[in-house]
Image (cartoon, rainbow, N blue to C red):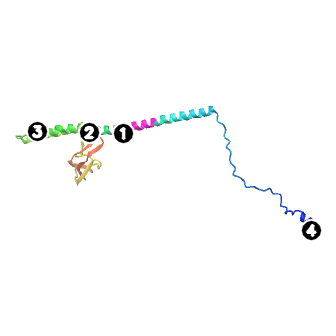
Amino acid sequence: MAEQDIKKEPVQEPETPDTPEVEPEEPQKEEKKGRKVSRKELEEVQAELEKTQKELAALKDQYLRTRAEYDNFRKRTEREKAAIYGDGTSDAIKGMLPVGDNLERALAQKDCSVEDLMKGVEMVQTQFLESLKKLGVTPMGNVGDEFNPELHNAVSHIEDENLEINVISAVFQKGYMLGDKVVRHAMVQVAN
């Protein structure tokens, strides 16, 4: 019977330490804890958004207008510069035309003495210098002036005991200035 008792007893599995069985975890879904927005808060946010959009539209409009104004200003300035240059050139030519007219009259004279011709050329030269003076152009580079390489172009050099060092002894071509700007350097001979 002992054999039968053994067979009737269920077979027990060896005991394992008390560890809970771990089941595979399902990915946890994060529940969004959103707070409910009241209708009043929603209206306030929408009003703020509309206000900001209006401000943005106003600033964009202001930017576009400013940009257009600047573009118009730039174009107008270019036109004015071109017109001023044209007016200045025209005024300079008007001042020189009488000189040219008098030179033509002098050349048209058939019977004229050398003295009369010389007097006429001197008058034309005076008229020419007056025209330059009206335009603000002044001659420079006279005999006896101190040589200045910023104003004069020395084309020759002489030794002369009667003249001081670095002094203009002869002028081959007058120089001219317009205010502080050199229009043409004087071509000179320098002593010592």
Give the farthest residue toward the left. Answer: 111
Under tag 3, what secondary structure? helix
Q: Residues within 10 Å of mark 2 (few under 14, many from 20)?
A: few
Cα distance in 3D space between marks 4 and 3: 161 Å
Main secondary structure of the magenta stretch: helix
Q: Which quadrant holds the N terminus? A: bottom right
Residue 111 located left or right of residue 164? left
In the rendered image, which quarter is residue 4 located in?
bottom right
Task: Specify the label residue 74 is tagged with.
Answer: 1
Q: Which mark is residue 86?
A: 2
Q: Nearer the viewer, residue 23 or 91?
A: 23
90 lies left or right of 77: left
What is the distance, in whole Å, between disc 2 and disc 3 at their CAs?
28 Å
Q: Where does the magenta region start and end?
A: 61-74
Q: Nearer the viewer, residue 51 or 158?
A: 51
The amino acid sitting under disc 3 is Arg
Q: Disc 1 and disc 3: Cα gap in Å?
A: 47 Å
Q: Earlier in the sequence, mark 1 or mark 2?
A: 1
**Residue 20's x, y, as percent?**
80, 56
* In this view, the mark in front (2 or 3): 2
Q: Is residue 13 above or below residue 62?
A: below
Give the structural element (helix, strand or loop) at label 4.
helix
Q: In the orientation shown, which residue stands out farthest toward the top? A: 40
